[in-house]
Image (cartoon, helix red, strand yellow):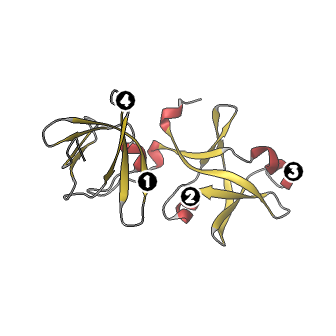
Amino acid sequence: MSTSEEFIPVGKISGVFGVKGWMKIFSFTDPRKNILSYSPLYMSQRGEWIEVKVMTGRVQGKGIVLSLENVTDPDQVLPLIGNELAITKQQLKPAGNNDYYWSQLIGMAVVNRQDEPLGIVDSLLETGAHDVLQVIEAEQKTQRLIPFVMDEIVDSVDLDNKIIRVDWELDY
């Protein structure tokens, strides 16, 4: 058994599909179908990650459906609905220059060009135009939404020291 920090959620079982034990998947990947490129997947079950083998899967309408080894009946899927699916950090393909996985950015400190701390990245939002860092500053109980636009607002991302430097003022 491994610690949860080694796993990155990529989706969730959201329902039963058909009569052969296929399941509907809500994919967290972008694009959605990228979840199908990972094997094995790991499923959360009673607080542990269990390796599951994907037999086959496909895009179905706006969603994803797949079948897992040894799941051949809809009744077997029902208790699994709501379970998260994850991959290990080792399964991630290295991101290109100035490309980052959201999971790498969450928890990083954000400072401005004057070295003033703006908070910690709590989550990211997808707006269509660009991603937005949701930065929480605990002491002031403030939340900032900072567009994640490299070379315009985001000056640098230091993964080793877990610091994102931005062109952003405290009073924005």
**At label 2, which amino acid type do we have?**
Ile
Q: Nearer the viewer, mark 1 or mark 2?
A: 1
Q: CA distance from mark 3 to mark 4?
A: 45 Å
Indicate which disc residue 138 carries: 4
Place of residue 41 in the rendered image (x, y in percent of width and height, measured from the top left): 60, 48
First-in-chain label (2 vs 4): 2
Pointer 3: what residue? 75
Q: Nearer the viewer, mark 1 or mark 4?
A: 4
Task: Work out whether residue 131 or residue 6 is closer to the camera in this orientation and state it.
Answer: 131
Q: Is residue 91 above or below residue 32?
A: above
Image quadrant occupied by the N terminus = top right
Indicate which disc residue 125 carries: 1
Indicate which disc residue 19 carries: none
Residue 73 can be seen in this image: no
Circles 1, 4 touching at the beta carbon (< 8 Å): no
The residue lying at 41 percent from left, 54 percent from top is 93
First-in-chain label (1 vs 4): 1
